[in-house]
Image: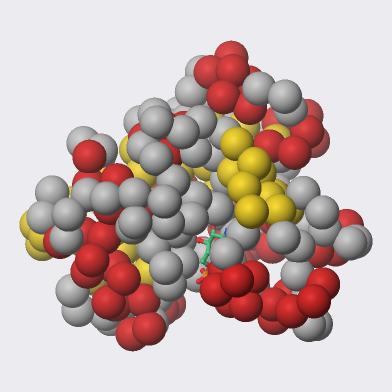
Amino acid sequence: MLATGTSPLTKTDSYEALSHELAEAIVKQLREKPTSCFGLPTGNTPIGCYKLLSRYSQMGALDWSRAHCFQLDEYVDAAADEQTFAHFLDSNLLGATNVPDENRYSPNDYNNYDELIESRGGLDLTVLGIGHNGHIAFNEPGTPRMSWTHSVWLTESTRHANKSYFGGQTVVPRRAVTMGIETILSSRKLILIASGRDKQEILERAMLGNVTPEVPASFLSLHPHVTVITDFEV
Ligand code: GLP
């Protein structure tokens, strides 16, 4: 564990090790507080961790029956259910767990997601990936710090990065709803994950550069309990 900027950094040797590290943190949180509220990301980076958690859950080693799982974000205009982040989380993790259906939340389904989160006790642990342009959840560059859950227009670079899920740029949704920066910073603990050399430059800007809306992930350095897990040197 190294101290880089204000964030403890866990540098692992491989994607598998990153996945184990993240899974361990989630398991610890769930065991210490079975009623935990989790903020969960989509994307490729958490998939290895989700596979591990799915396996532990199916083996009966994890009890999620009192946990609450909040999606970080969701497309507003996905053409099919299979393209939604709700579907992604269900098929990669939640479907293998005993999180009750009523404890799985998408920001698309609520008028006041922040109030809902608050009413469930507030986020205990929120996991975030990072986009190549520094976005977290779908807070694109330019998002002010004082932002709660809101709807957004996606940048072309984000739509391009996510097009593998859609079979063609033209059908990638243009709009989404996302937790805001304040929603994320209100979580008691945060973990930022980044895998692959192509994330190195933006992660360094986020961790070591100025705190600026131009790099939304840089706001994370304002949080007292953020851990960064990578599989490369920073
Ligand atoms: C999407 C999601 C983000 C995620 C990002 C990075 O844009 N909205 O929450 O962090 O992708 O995804 P990946 O892990 O595939 O690089």
Q: Residue furthest right?
A: 80
Q: Is residue 95 above or below residue 71?
A: below
The structure residue drawn at horizontal position 22% and vertical position 69%, both measured from the top left corner, is: 204
Q: Position of residue 47 (x, y in %)?
A: 57, 68
The structure residue drawn at horizontal position 80% and vertical position 82%, both measured from the top left corner, is: 167
Report the quarter where the C terminus lies. bottom left
The structure residue drawn at horizontal position 13% and vertical position 49%, both measured from the top left corner, is: 6
Q: Position of residue 230 (x, y in %)?
A: 31, 70
Q: How is the image coloured?
A: secondary structure
> Depth check: 210 or 195 in front?
210
Q: Position of residue 62 (x, y in %)?
A: 58, 45
Q: Is residue 22 above or below residue 211?
A: below
Horizontally, residue 174 falls left or right of residue 51, namely right
> Depth check: 228 or 142 in front?
142
The answer to whether residue 101 shows anywhere in this view is yes
Horizontally, residue 139 falls left or right of residue 231, namely right
Q: Position of residue 215 (x, y in %)?
A: 33, 58
Report the quarter where the N terminus lies. bottom left
The structure residue drawn at horizontal position 57% and vertical position 24%, both measured from the top left corner, is: 114
Q: Is residue 201 above or below residue 185?
A: below
